[in-house]
Image (spheres, rainbow, N blue to C red):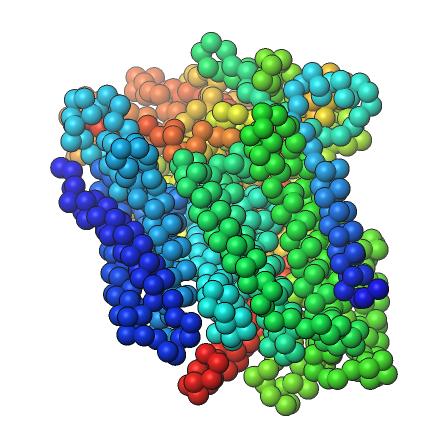
Amino acid sequence: MIHTTVGDIGHASIVVALIAAIVAAFSYFKASSAKDFLSETSDQKSWRKFARLFFYLHSAAIFGVVGTLFYIIKNHYYEYHYAWDHSSNSLPIYYMISSFWEGQEGSFLLWLFWHVVLGLVLIHQNKTWEAPMMAVFCAVQAFLASMILGSVLPLVELKIGSSPFILLKDFMGSLPVYKINPDYVPEDGTGLNPLLQNYWMVIHPPTLFLGFATTLIPFAYCIAGLWMGRYKEWIRPALPWALFSAMVLGTGILMGGYWAYETLNFGGYWNWDPVENAVYVPWLVLVAAIHCMIIYKNSNTALKPAVILAIASFVLILYSTFLTRSGILGSSSVHSFTDLGLSGQLLIYLLFFSLLSLVLLVFRWKKIPDTEKEASVYSREFWVFIGVTVLCLAGFQVLATTSIPVYNSIIALFGIKSNVAPPADQMEHYSKFQIWAGIFIAILSGIGQFFWWKKMDGKKLWNAISIPLLLALVISMLVMYFTGLDQPAYILLVATSIFSICANAFILKDVLKANPKLSGGAVSHIGVAMMLIGILYSSGYSKIISLNNSGMTYSKEFSKEMNKENLLLWRNDPEQMDDFTLLYKGQRLESPDFAGFINKDEVVQLDNKAKVIAKKDIIYQAKVQYKKGDTINIAPENTFYEVQYSKANGDTFTLYPRAQVNPQMGLIASPDIKRFWGRDLYSFVSSIPTPDRDREWSELVEHTAHIGDTIFLNDFVAILQDVKRETNVPGVTLKSTDAAVRAHFKLLGKDKNYDVYPIYVVLMEDHMVGQIPEVVEDLGIKITFLSIDPASGTFTFGVNTTQKDYIILKAIEKPAINILWLGTLLLVIGLAIAIVRRYTEFIKMRNKGVEV
Amino acid sequence: MKKTHILAIVIIAIAIGVIMSTAGDASTYVCFKDASNMAAEGDNDKVHVVGKLKKDAAGNIEGMIYDPVIDANRFEFVLVDNNNQVQTVIYNQPKPQDFDKSEQVVIVGSMRGEVFMADQIIMKCPSKYEDKELKETASN
């Protein structure tokens, strides 16, 4: 049966949300017509009340849409395309939450949801700014709601938005099954992309979208300020939110990087992919905006840059949305959203707010207060402003290159075909500028802080700076010596970052003594400097240690540039890699019911892919977890490859890199990471033999033997030890009349011997015989118990051989990566301290009724 | 001259530098014929070539060689560019795992003699959104 009501409710809620947002935006606009907030006329007051009512209605509708969509996913209503496409029966509840935002519609919804939450907070937090600011908010909401509308406009036949409540039969109605049964409902969904089945994917998207959503707040305050002629006053309420936004957006970006590091196999946390760049640039600009706002608060300069940058950070968020969702990136990005045909709408969204702000800015430009005074070289404003410039230029470089597909599209509008592609070596292209940006930021964040706290002249500066500078020099020398830094730019980046840490540490010491609440700046700058060091070492000095030394050379073409970065490991055949001896021990499965891994050879797969039966007792940490014949739940998609690393000095550890077999996406490898104090050892399986189902076996060779006989299988010798009656055959229910016998072979391998137990089953009632062969994976040999001849006392066995089991492994060492994560943590803490400070300031002034 | 002006000049200079470097580093989308011509003229710039895998009538991929037992770091395949020119491509990395399913392949690299050496393979897989087929169950 198709549940149409719930979808109708959802769709109706979207329509209500859209209309309510438009009404609220218009009413807030009317309410903002006052010249002065405090002298609100009764007419304006009623407009504002009316607008607020509609914003509440809009909020309720958005909550309704979210609830409805989740209800559909939760109850597995696969008659809805969204549920069918993104979820499946076996998904646990926390991944159902991720499937909610896997699709574009759901992620728009998440964005709408955060705006609503923030809007509700702001209405109550700041009543005087409510009308103009919420007018901007509601206009944004109207645009976003239209993206998920999915209705066709009458008369013009124009489809607006893509609804998450579309029925599967409306989406793919041409399928033959609907001709037979129009009410057909699939029994299971196609599931969540396995790469997204990761805990980071439960928290990363909401964090990132909260970051996106919060950039609207400084923008809305700024536009409201320009509009109402309150050019300066918007800064105070906007600043804590701008800081909050930088914190959340930064955390979101880093979480994405961390997810990529842990889950994807491109070997790092940052790939300069357009999707990543598209959020990195607005973040840089937002940080620059924050610095300008702080300069303004302290010295009444840099108001114009603050206005421009606050607007730019939001417009860049819109631009990044356009880039990643319109399909314009085409082949230049590996993982952008699918094109839902929203590009026109997204472009209008982008242009509307860009032009609106531009027009407003042009009309108000002359009125924005400015100082004619030249900033002195010894003033803090000067240094911070240089820092802002560096941030903006760094962002500009990334933006200029990421937009290459956009240039092609624009040129195409004039009928010219452009064939410009992104740089072949993106890492090199971006790094050569970003590293200098990093160096300047490190220097400026060190020096700037001294100016920040003291009135400076040349002599005082030297007094303050000499000790940290000297200390930094000494530490840098030591670090250089011990870590073998070689390239000039790398040396500079490390030295300047160490200087920044030293300088900020001195500042921090003084500030903590005076007023710990003000320590946010010093803490976050130390964090940034640590991040720079961590990034430099983990990327610049990451070392591939799985260099191939197997001796099998194949250098027909290019011996010089052969980068043999991947190593072949046969099962149970040790291989030397760097200073490790590696041993691939076999395939492992994972059970949701206990923490250890299950050896795939010790279990039998059942028809139900999520269940296996134990062939023998399964022991984990000296305890029997499962008895022979027990059924075990497993996670069917994942296979882990146990690889033991041992050093000559006896240090041994084991990694379990993972591969997922997915019908839609083929094989997906995820790394396993061994974390040391100063470095990570990162390994992943870059290739494996084709999985079981289409494994090729040699033709069966028959052998007949008595007990005690020796047979020869390829290069190996096997001795038939005995044949015994078996009462417990895992996976087979034996009745009293049935019989099972088990042969025991001792197979003599190169380094060790194997016990092989093929089984022969006779089911009397069903008049059937069955064979349960056993495979020796190490050798690629399968022995099947074919028949018994009671007259002569001989047994017949079949032997097939196949390729031995192996994996191709890539291992990379990433030094100092923990400094990056630690630095990130400090940056977040520093920003949090600053938020508290600026927010208390705002509340204090608001309650006094001053300048709000 | 005021400091602001000096600063402005420096910023403009850097911005121009950025644009020049973007233009200089940018690669191009070409066909195999152009790639060969470039190599013949001694131009070693890396290019992007867009193409499809060569398939026989039954839809099986032709000319793909990956034998990790011989060399795990050598993957050879045949790509047909948009002008239907067929070219052998060598990639000194293991075969990308979803390669067989890709609809369109973009390779980045340059021609070396008779073969195209790819440093990077970018695959456009038929998006899971379009490729899914309804598994029809017996229950209806």
Q: What residue do we see at 52% from left, 36% from top?
A: A328
- The quadrant holding residue A446 is bottom right
Question: In x, y percent, where is residue A121?
Answer: 36, 70
Q: Which quadrant holds the N terminus of chain A?
A: top left
Q: Does any portion of residue B74 appear in the rendered image?
A: no
Q: Give coordinates of residue A141: x percent, y percent.
A: 36, 55
- Say how many tags the image has: 0
Q: Is residue A196 visible?
A: yes
Give how far across and how far down residue A109 sits, in percent: 35, 51
As displayed, is residue A567 above or below residue A18?
A: above
Residues A835 and A376: in front is A376
Q: Is residue A427 left or right of residue A68?
A: right
Residue that protrudes farthest toward the top in the picture: B57
Residue at (46, 25) in percent of width and height: A695
Residue A148 versus residue A801: which sits nearer the camera?
A148
Position of A599 with respect to A366 (left or right) is left
Q: Position of residue A316 (x, y in %)?
A: 54, 52
Q: Which residue is rendered at x = 57% and y = 44% of the image?
A: A274
Q: Is residue B44 above or below residue A357?
A: above
Relative placement, left or right, of A444 versus A80 is: right
> Quarter holding the C terminus of chain A?
bottom left
Q: Is residue A89 left or right of residue A507?
A: left
